Amino acid sequence: MTDLDPHKISKQIKDQISTIVGSKTYNAWFKNIYIKSLDNGVCVLVCNNNYHKEWLEVNSRNLISNKLKEITNLSYEVDIQVAPKSETKNNAYEYFNPDEYSSGLFQNNKVIENSGITNVTTQSVKITKPILTNLNPKYTFNSYIVGSSNQLAHAVAEAVVSSPGTIYNPLYIYGRTGVGKTHLIQAIGNSLLEANPHFKIRYIPTEGFMNEIVEAIRSNTTPQFRDTYRELDVLILDDIQFISRFKKTQDELFNTFNQLYQENKHIIMASDRQPHEIDNLPDRIQSRFEGGMLIDIHPPDFETRVAIIKSRALENNVAITAEVCEFLANQIFNNIRELEGAVNKVCIQIKFDPQPITTDLVAQMLKINAENKRRKIPPERILKAVNNIFDVSESDIKGKSRTQHIVRARHAFVYLYRDELEVSLKQIARFINRKDHTTILNSYSKAKGLIEKDTFYAQKIEACKSEIYGA
């Protein structure tokens, strides 16, 4: 190829990558990259921020390098760089650049004008009435275990602490039950309160918010209720999906939301689903929820689960063997709360019973039966998990498309079906409409190879397992 125009090659590479990965992955990690130069065997690839750079280097450097060689017929060393501030898109809702937001609301103990939080200094504070924060002091960033499933959410949360009221407002964190949303949103609150003791912060589950509204109406104290919430600097609402049940709560929250937002006060929410997936949520509220940063947390991968187990055991001053750690991490996939509960049980057993803790004893103690668990899993559940994680359909898996990202998803389904249910190749072939079981064997081998070589693919397999066993 003689035309080495960086712009054209950027487009070709991104077009090809979009056929390999699902649309969600492409939009999150590849949509905004571009090639700045191709000189002296070096391809300078530009991305939005340091976290984006780290993710690309770990997960996609080889993929980009291979596609570059296919297109140009030349070998390039890929140098991934962060765009200078002058080149970075002004879009705080896609990526976080910590260097851009190093200064917070307060500089040299003075209030920045128009910050939205007025009449406050870090030297002298006059609080008119105490605010019940409802924050649990055990939920801190120090005790929050960060892994690939929550790394971006954690970075965004720290950014909010560094510049409250100015970026990622509102912040909407979503993910299935037990993945650490409550811990993270309360860690934001605790960190903000530690850095800014004068802040009025309140954490409350949405059902609690509703109960307070009902009580205010009953006791004729609605004005006081409104004052309490509309004078906050930070409002943290948990389980916001429950707002769909209560019309009066929606109206009150809508008005509170508007006032806080207009005054640059921070609003943080957690939910088990995205705003557009909340039943009967009015468009006016949905649009406000979606007006800031939406970020999801996935179930923890194997390494993160092991780290959580070790951390909780350390907190209990108990040593758990590597074998038991790995056994627990392999048995409890998607729910951190459940995993921590299991660790606590094991720690109590170790403290009060001198006999050695084995995997058999742990299985008996926690009533874990891996074989029964496997037998109860229908192949349809595996298919649904693969469809969700790889962004494909059932017809894609059972069809004959050779599009690369569909083929990889099909390999993943075969691998999981074979490994998790331990069924015959012929049985898998029948399920996905294949006549020859040797095709299934080849697909299984391809998946194993990808898991060993491609970190991103391996993470998707772990995410599938989490969804399978959490369904």
Image (tube, rainbow, N blue to C red):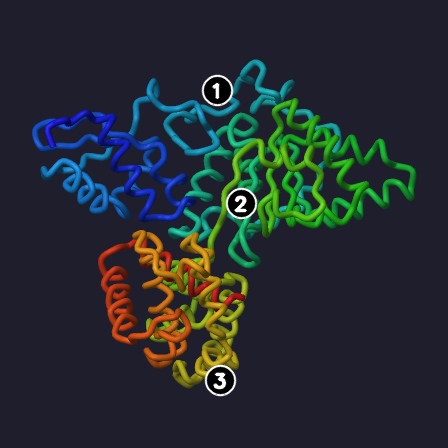
One can see residue 162 in this view: yes
Mark 3 in CB contact with mark 2 (< 8 angstroms): no
* CB atoms of marks 1 and 3 within 8 Å: no
Q: Seen in the image, is 8 located left or right of residue 200?
A: left
Q: Distance between the residues labelled 2 and 1?
A: 23 Å
2 vs 1, front mark? 2
Foreground disc of the pair 3, 2: 3
- Residue 386: give x, y in percent of width and height: 43, 61
Residue topped by disc 2: 187
Amino acid type at circle 3 is Gln
Q: Is residue 378 above or below residue 137?
A: below
Q: In which quarter of the image is the C terminus?
A: bottom right
Q: Where is residue 24 in the image (x, y as percent from the top left)?
A: 43, 45
Q: Which of marks 1 and 3 is in front?
A: 3
- List the residue tagged with mark 3: 364
Q: Is residue 315 visible?
A: no
**Crowd band around label 2 with a 10 angstrom C-alpha radius: few (<14), some (14–19), many (20+):** many
Q: Which residue is drawn at 53% across and 68% down?
A: 341
